[in-house]
Amino acid sequence: MSQSNYRPTLAIKLASMQPPEAADSSALAGFAGNNTEMAIANNLLLQPGEPGEMLVQLENLGGRPLRWRLEIEGDFPLGWCTWQQEEAEEIAPNQKVDKSLCFEIPEDYFENQYALNRGRDRLKINYETQVYVYAEAQTSRQLVAYRVFNLCVRPSTSYLNFLPGIYREIDFIGRFLTIFEQAFDPAVQTIDVLWAYLDPLTAPSALLPFLAHWVAWPIDRRWDIKQQRRLIRNAVELYRWHGTRRGLRFYLHLYTDLPLDENLPEAEKHISIEEVFTRGFVMGETIIGRDSMLGGGRPFHFFVRLRPEPDKPIDERLVRDIIEREKPAFCTYDLLISQT
């Protein structure tokens, strides 16, 4: 007779790993006084794309072992919770068992058009969840404990961190500030990487004409994007060495990508620029074959020799345009392109 009247006693406690900081009147309906603080602690804050965890502790207060099963119900989508219990488990008298309920909502929850167009005028952000614990016998089962908590879906926000703590006590403030945070976020992200927009090597292609205008550099469509970036980046240095051997060699290096070969003699460089300093033939002052030569009297004349790789052709016309742009106006030159 005593066995048939036995009522199993199983205590259940909930502990939220991510409780909401602020109180939401819609999520706390029916609670008052000290129960309000308890309800906040038992609610679970969920943010899109981030996992949330609710700990459940069961304690057998009776004198007999129990076989128990935990079930979860609620108005939230089934795919949010990963709890599964294939078979009933046994708990000994005065034993405690801890279980974890894991929840995760889609990363695009607030942007998903399916969530916004389900025949309602507002997006649901609070979901009620029921936890049922059953004691199972061979032929029957009995409900021995149950708890209710809310899933509070909120967007991630950092603006509250810049406000006094009292503003965190009101849930609406956080949700209201999220509107401005989402609206201004692209501008904030741009400011954080503003240096990359001002560097020709990392700036968007559409911004290159603007950066070129900053340094008064003309855009030549014969140059590919990579070469244009390098030219704009080094425009000031090219201006500094304009009209010199160093400036011309560096300009040709940016186009041809040939090495500068600073450690090699001039005649052996991949970009060789040699000037003619031999005196011309003057009667009475020079000796033929020793310190003068016929035809050596070409003042302000130099030779440019390029030695590219066989698989890297060079546009001779563009090279001549570069030389004409960089050399002094009164100078003449000869160009020779030979394969290495």
Image (tube, rainbow, N blue to C red):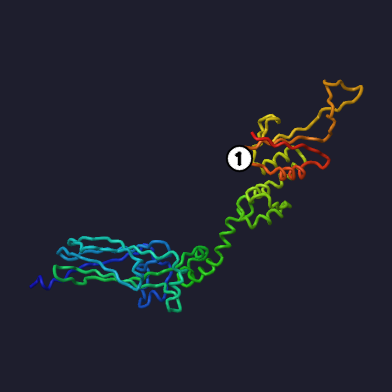
Q: Which amino acid lies under the numbered mark 1 shown in the image of this protein?
A: Asp
| Total marks placed | 1
Q: Quadrant of the N terminus?
A: bottom left
| 177 or 328, nearer to the observer | 328
Badge 1 density bin: few <14, some 14–19, many ≥20, Cα 10 Å: few
Closer to us: 318 or 149: 318
Q: Is residue 190 above or below residue 337?
A: below
Kindly identify the residue that appears in the image at 21 percent across and 60 percent down: 95
Is 205 in front, or is 174?
205
Give the image location of residue 282, x and y in percent.
Answer: 90, 25
Residue lying farthest to the left in this orientation:
1
* Foreground pick, 106 / 97: 106
Q: Quadrant of the C terminus?
A: top right
Residue 237, how many percent across, how many down? 71, 44
Q: Which residue is mark 1?
A: 311
Vertically, is 61 above or below 236? below
The secondary element bearing badge 1 is classed as: loop
Q: Is residue 265 left or right of residue 296?
A: left
As drawn, is 169 to the left or to the right of 238? left
- Left or right: 132 with respect to 37? left
- Compared to residue 313, the image places residue 228 above or below, namely below
Does 213 appear above or below 240?
below
Q: Position of residue 25 (x, y in %)?
A: 41, 76
Q: Position of residue 71 (x, y in %)?
A: 26, 68
**Residue drawn at (42%, 62%) of the image:** 49
